[in-house]
Image (cartoon, grey):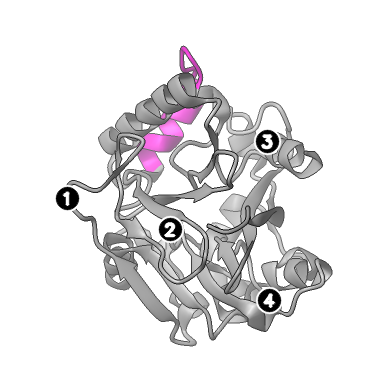
Amino acid sequence: MSAPPRIHHLDCGTMCPHGLVGLGLAPRDPGHLVAHCLLIEAPDGLVLVDTGYGTGDVAAPRRLGPARHLLGARLDPQQTAVERVRALGHDPADVRHVLITHLDLDHAGGLGDFPNATVHLHAPELAAARARRGDTKLRYRPAQWAHGPRWAPHATLDGDRWMGFERASLVEDVGVDIALVPLPGHSAGHAGYAIDTGAGWLLHAGDAFLHPDEIATPPVRSRGLRAYHRVNSADHRLLGENAARLGDLTRDHGAEVDVFCSHDAVALRRRQSA
């Protein structure tokens, strides 16, 4: 990597699930959750990590289904990733790669706003989204990818590891070292992305945890939050195991790796101000 990449922390969605706040999802910032995305200025173009809600969601909220009401989604066109990219002075057409932690409606809504980008994700996630079995019909909304993205599914490679985690692969041809790190549990193919900043690593862990206290030492998880994870996890055991491993990572390598999740408004604001 010739020079450290410039990385922007974006807020690409507001959710006000007031009932979930009472479960301990956002006690430090009552009233809303965010959709924390990244824009990376790479030598060969722009890279997005997750997209939040998109202009298609704003124009046709019903395509989100009943989950829109459960999440309390506030659909603001100025919060879409495509408008965030423009506000930073970039052409959205320069977004060459989109890295998706998972295809839940609050993470993949903006895919259609970047139709020429290659969309990277963990292969089991794409398979699960296409199958849409059982209650996953609420979380996966095919209208968000009806434009036919250029999918780049990554399969886990045995023996290739990052900080003790399995690593699916490096994202190629972006000029920045970015590793897709499998973190299944919340969804079948959920993944995080580790980005080499030149001064350490950023790990966008998606929904592998929902509050930083879950990966604290010792971890703290309210009864309501535990119940939420049981109901909303494809594999609750794997979710817990990966949260524990992320806790170990922050304890043992906190000076080298900055770990954050998708929906913590306080953590997002802190990184934006920094």
Q: Earlier in the sequence, mark 2 or mark 4?
A: 4
Labels 2 and 4 touching (C-beta < 8 A): no
Give the camera-side residue of 146 and 173: 173
Q: CA distance from mark 2 to mark 4?
A: 19 Å
Considering the numbered disc 1 on the image, is that residue within a helix, a strand or a loop? loop
**In-image side of 34 versus 166 (left or right):** right
Q: What amino acid type is highlighted by mark number 3? A: Ala
- Residue at the extreme top: 218
Residue assigned mark 3: 267
Query: Is residue 178 magenta-colored?
Result: no
Q: Position of residue 246 (x, y in %)?
A: 41, 30
User: Above or below — where is 153 with respect to 184?
Assistant: below
- Mark 2, Cα crowd under 10 Å, few <14 / some 14-19 / many 20+, is many
State whether residue 23 appears in this view: no
Residue at coordinates 72% horizontally, 40% vertically from top-left? 271
Q: What amino acid type is highlighted by mark number 4? A: Thr
Residue assigned mark 1: 158
The part of the chain drawn in magenta is 216-231
Closer to the camera: disc 1 or disc 2? 1
Q: Earlier in the sequence, mark 1 or mark 2?
A: 2
Labels 4 and 1 touching (C-beta < 8 A): no
Residue assigned mark 4: 55
Q: CA distance from mark 3 to mark 4?
A: 25 Å
Q: Earlier in the sequence, mark 3 or mark 4?
A: 4
Determine the image quadrant of residue 239: top left
Query: Is residue 221 magenta-colored?
Result: yes
Residue assigned mark 2: 102
State whether residue 142 appears in this view: yes
